[in-house]
Amino acid sequence: MIRSRVDSNPTFVLKQFAPDKPLRLIVYGDMRFTDPNITSGTNPKVRSWLAARIGEEKPQALLLTGDMPFVGSRNEDWAEYRKETASWTAAGFPVFPTIGNHEIKGDPVKGAANYLANFPQIQGHRFYSAVLGPVEVIGLDMILPGSPRSEQYRWFAAQLAHIPASVQFLFILYHTPWVADTQSQMIAGLPTKDGLALRTLLESYVPKLHAKVVMFSGHIHNYERFERHGVEYVVTGGGGAQPYPLLYRGEHDLYRDPGFPVFNYVTVEVENHALHAEMWKVTDPDATPLSVEKKDSFAIEAVKP
């Protein structure tokens, strides 16, 4: 659903979340769900184990950074997504995604329709905002235009200008990173032109915002973290897709561990006007059983009322 006019109100307000109550979320992406017999481009063992583990953790909400299916226009890949994430449905927590390039792989029109059909929480919206007590999530669309003349850009500006007073932390979801390590900049051409336009818009609003901002992305099948102009930029794309090695990490990447591969997810806890996030990395993808270890963390204090 693409809006015919710019709306400054939140798309969704989830009443079960209160601004003064603790909130626990998980963020991750780039799984590439498909036939478990396919092992090129995706790791079915790690992918399914991570999906099951997140179901066991029962976050109050789950945020996805894109590239959930391998081929978005293939119904069978979405069926495998539903099968491997059945524990999410059983746990009943809301799931908020952002669309990636694999969602439209094959046939872009059919892929986008499949994406919307498999995420009923967003009710057909390609870009949206959702207030979850002390947190607001803004999910943007890397496929639709994001230039200053676009509908999405104008809508994003209106949302940034009207963050509800109860919101302490603003989370942005967009598949491709708006800040990336040196290697990703050179090899993958990141950030994109539209990503840069949206990043510039966001950073122009940061000094005016009462909410602290964290931007989550995927696309790079690894983990990276940066701080820039008052925004924490986190790349969590380790959900099971074929890992991308970082041959070196630039000095501005706050995650320094050289270990590889980095299959991962991020937990975020908000309580008492503070945010604490931890990155959990699969210790050894070849081990039986699999396990995770904490490899990064960061904390942010909210602006006190």
Image: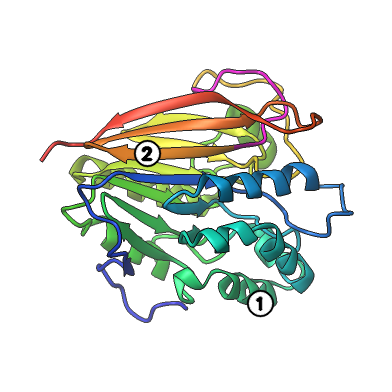
Residue stretch rendered in magenta on the structure: 253-264
What amino acid does circle 1 point to? Val
Residue 109 is tagged as 1
- Kindly identify the residue that appears in the image at 65 percent across and 40 percent down: 238
Q: Is residue 52 left or right of residue 46?
A: left
Q: Nearer the viewer, mark 2 or mark 1?
A: 2
Under circle 1, the secondary element is: helix
**Colour scheme of the picture:** rainbow
Q: Would you identify the image quadrant in which residue 295 lies? A: top right
Q: Quadrant of residue 82?
A: bottom right
Quarter of the picture containing the C terminus is: top left
Q: Which secondary structure lies at badge 2? A: strand
User: Mark on residue 269?
Assistant: 2
Nearer-the-camera pick, 149 or 270: 270
Q: Earlier in the sequence, mark 2 or mark 1?
A: 1
Cα distance in 3D space between marks 2 and 1: 36 Å
Crowding near the residue tagged with mark 1, few <14, some 14–19, many ≥20 C-alpha atoms within 10 Å = some
Q: How many residues crowd around disc 2 within 10 Å: few (fewer than 14), some, or many (20 or more)?
A: some
Q: Is residue 258 magenta?
A: yes
Q: Amino acid at mark 2?
A: Glu
Does the magenta stretch mainly form a helix, a strand or a loop? loop
Residue drawn 61% across and 35% down? 185
Give yes or no for contact between labels 2 and 1 (Cβ–Cβ under 8 Å).
no
* Image x and y of residue 300, in percent: 31, 31
Can the viewer see residue 43 in this picture? Answer: no
User: Does residue 266 appear in this view?
Assistant: yes
